[in-house]
Image (cartoon, rainbow, N blue to C red):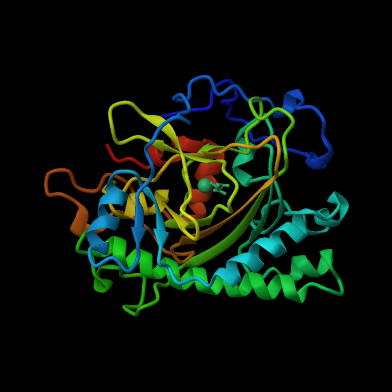
Amino acid sequence: MVSVSGFRTHTTHVHDNNQDLSSVQEVSDSFTWLLDDLPPGDSSSVETIPVIDLTDPDIVNRIGHACQTWGVFQITGHGVPVGLIDRLELQGRRFFSLPIDQKLKAARRPGDLSGYGQAPILSYFEKVMWSEGFTMAESPANLACQVWPDDYTEFCDVMEEYKKEMKALASKIMWLMLSSLVICKEDLEWSEPTEELDGSAVLHLNWYPRCPDPSRAIGMVPHTDSTFITILYPSSTAGLQVLQAHTAQAHWVSVDRVPGSLIINVGDLLHILTNGRFRSSLHQALVNQDKPRFSAPFFFGPPKDTLIGPLIKLTDADKGPLYRAVKMDEYLGLKKKHYQNALNLLKLA
Ligand SMILES: O=C(O)CCC(=O)C(=O)O
Ligand SMILES: [Fe+2]
């Protein structure tokens, strides 16, 4: 397993970092990460993650192959209106460009998933990432009306519309992924055998302010996403890197986004559901010296109270299930406490 060294600790850190990063001139110690045992970055690599058109006649095989190798791929032909994506980015930028005191009116409260602040995974580390985020597990109206008492409906309307679009797309992609393993609707006991898969949906916005010294800071530490799949809108600014881990020499590959595409990541719960056939992908976000970066991941997972374990059809007679079943909330708790070791902790002997 790849780890971020020097900061491994079992204490949960409460960060009170309410600094306005856009005005910071120097990367202080609390932002300086030593990523010394990570595989080397590979900016000269000509490799790219798979690009798959959703209208490709061979879509099921192509998606299945991408999930079993990279665990991440770009999709084109997804049908999400460009205008909606533009409005999402516009509203996201509108939010993050507010003064810090105004954003803090929507601050994430202890124990909540929704709200403004640093990514929850950060509690594992002593250091702070060069980013801020806004998580929306349910309707953002309650939070947004604190920020813009007279003018929050436009923000909320766009977020709701985008989320609805993402949920339908996530369901479609999940079925394509599962079809490649000959899993059908009847095999998922927790979802109605309808077109739209039952599940939980969380929209998150990331903002990476310009950084005076990108070599010392990191926007988002290497991590795998926790739910079934993530649909990421990475915006046009570079920064996302994924670990190519399916060949002997693991290395980071910068994602060169095909205009208009969205990025799909396999998350840990899908890794468990497929008994390790699909691999959750390790990725990180770098920061830029000359411009800020926006990104918007949509996390799609199982219904809250559903136990997710390896599908019986995917457990081999000799090996059986590789992981014990877990509910999403329990898994998110494990991830917060054990970071990238969470998946290992569920491994059956
Ligand atoms: O900003 C990015 O490109 C990646 C963000 C990410 O991985 C996340 O929010 O989980
Ligand atoms: Fe992620």
Nearer-the-camera pick, 298 or 7: 298
Q: Residue at x 42, y 68 (%)?
A: 78
Residue 310: image quadrant is bottom left
Left or right position of 342 against 185? right
For residue 101, above or below residue 30:
below
Quadrant into which the C terminus falls: top left
Nearest the eye: 147 or 294: 294
The answer to whether residue 15 is visible is: yes
**Residue 184: x, y in percent?**
24, 70
Left or right of 97 in this view: 88: left
Residue at the image position 25 percent from the left and 68 percent from the top:
187
Q: Is residue 275 visible?
A: no
Residue 61 percent coordinates (x, y): 22, 58
Q: Residue at x 53, y 27 (%)?
A: 4
Q: Given the current orientation, which residue lies at the most extreme left position?
A: 317
The picture quadrant where one finds residue 20 is top right
